[in-house]
């Protein structure tokens, strides 16, 4: 404990903590055996926990979750330093340089009219950087990471396509397309019901459901609604209502598994009515 108290303040102390955790002789066995690949799921999880704290408006939790996310950056940087690839200071230098380079209207003589214009300028700067790095892919869709959550990647693909004019002009045709895709899903459900062992039918059903989700993401984009935030909100609402159903059933001396779907729907509708 005395050693911990003697740690330098700020980020230097956190870097030293991580170095000690990764020490091959005296460190933590779990931390020592981790790799970039094994840590990635934790990195993603911590980013989502930051988003959850923001959604809940819990600033104390946000402070803790940002610390957890920062630890992930420090962890990756430490493993890279052990391989003589780069260190934490290189990460800081890289992002600092990028922020200055991509904000010439702040750190240079350029100007932008508004946030939308800045978004266009940002994407153009990224395109020039990819070109300067020798990337051969000149598509408008170049550079969109395949490791993104698929809903997020869908929105990015749509935004890039829209940047060259390939986009619906308003939400109305998107809604019409959604109805069209839902009807195609209905057709494929019927096909699977008629031939449950038909792998091709199941493949078509998966494809059509994917089309529905893709159009839903596009509809959210047109509404300027964040898909992830909207889905998190829907998840929280479902969880809140379902837990209330369980509680009401228990108060009536019942358990949900013992009830018919019709009776469960009765509790669901009661909970919805009480929320209004």
Image: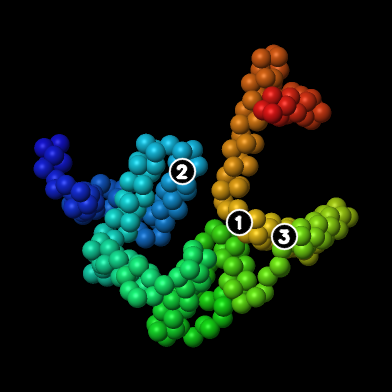
Crowd around label 1: few <14 · some 14–19 · many ≥20 (10 Å): few
Residue 147 visible, this angle: no
Badge 3 element = helix
- Percent x, y for residue 116? 52, 66
Does residue 77 lie above or below 236 as drawn?
Answer: below
Query: Which residue is farthest right?
Result: 194
Earlier-in-chain disc, 1 versus 2: 2
- Percent x, y for residue 236? 59, 38
Left or right: where does residue 48 sit relative to residue 36?
right
Badge 1 element = loop
Closer-to-camera residue (78/108): 108
Look at the numbered discs 3 and 1 and tell me whether their residues touch, using CB distance below 8 Å: no
Can you identify the residue that label 2 sits on?
54
Quadrant where the N terminus sits is top left
Look at the numbered discs 1 and 2 and tell me whether their residues touch, using CB distance below 8 Å: no
Residue 171: image tag: 3
Earlier-in-chain disc, 2 versus 3: 2
Quadrant where the C terminus sits is top right
Crowd around label 3: few <14 · some 14–19 · many ≥20 (10 Å): some
Left or right: where does residue 175 sit relative to residue 21?
right
Q: Nearer the viewer, mark 1 or mark 2?
A: 1
């Amino acid at each position: 404990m005395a050693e911990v108290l003697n740690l330098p303040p700020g980020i230097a102390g956190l870097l030293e903590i991580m170095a000690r955790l990764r020490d091959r002789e005296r460190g933590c066995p779990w931390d020592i055996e981790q790799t970039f690949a094994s840590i990635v799921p934790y990195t993603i999880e911590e980013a989502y926990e930051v988003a959850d704290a923001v959604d809940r408006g819990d600033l104390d939790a946000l402070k803790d979750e940002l610390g957890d996310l920062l630890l992930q950056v420090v962890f990756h940087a430490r493993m890279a330093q052990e391989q003589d690839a780069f260190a934490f200071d290189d990460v800081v230098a890289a992002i600092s340089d990028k922020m200055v380079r991509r904000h010439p209207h702040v750190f240079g003589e350029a100007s932008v009219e508004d946030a939308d214009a800045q978004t266009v300028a940002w994407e153009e700067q990224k395109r020039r950087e990819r070109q300067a790095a020798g990337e051969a892919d000149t598509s408008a869709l170049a550079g969109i990471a395949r490791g993104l959550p698929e809903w997020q990647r869908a929105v990015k693909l749509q935004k890039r396509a829209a940047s060259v004019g390939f986009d619906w002009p308003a939400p109305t045709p998107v809604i019409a397309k959604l109805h069209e895709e839902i009807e195609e899903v209905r057709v494929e459900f019927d096909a699977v019901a008629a031939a449950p062992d038909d792998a091709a039918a199941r493949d078509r059903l998966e494809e059509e459901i994917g089309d529905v989700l893709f159009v839903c993401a596009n509809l959210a984009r047109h509404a300027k609604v964040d898909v992830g935030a909207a889905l998190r909100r829907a998840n929280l609402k479902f969880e809140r209502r379902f837990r209330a159903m369980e509680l009401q059933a228990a108060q009536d001396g019942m358990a949900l598994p013992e009830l018919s779907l019709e009776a469960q729907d009765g509790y669901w509708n009661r909970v919805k009515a009480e929320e209004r």
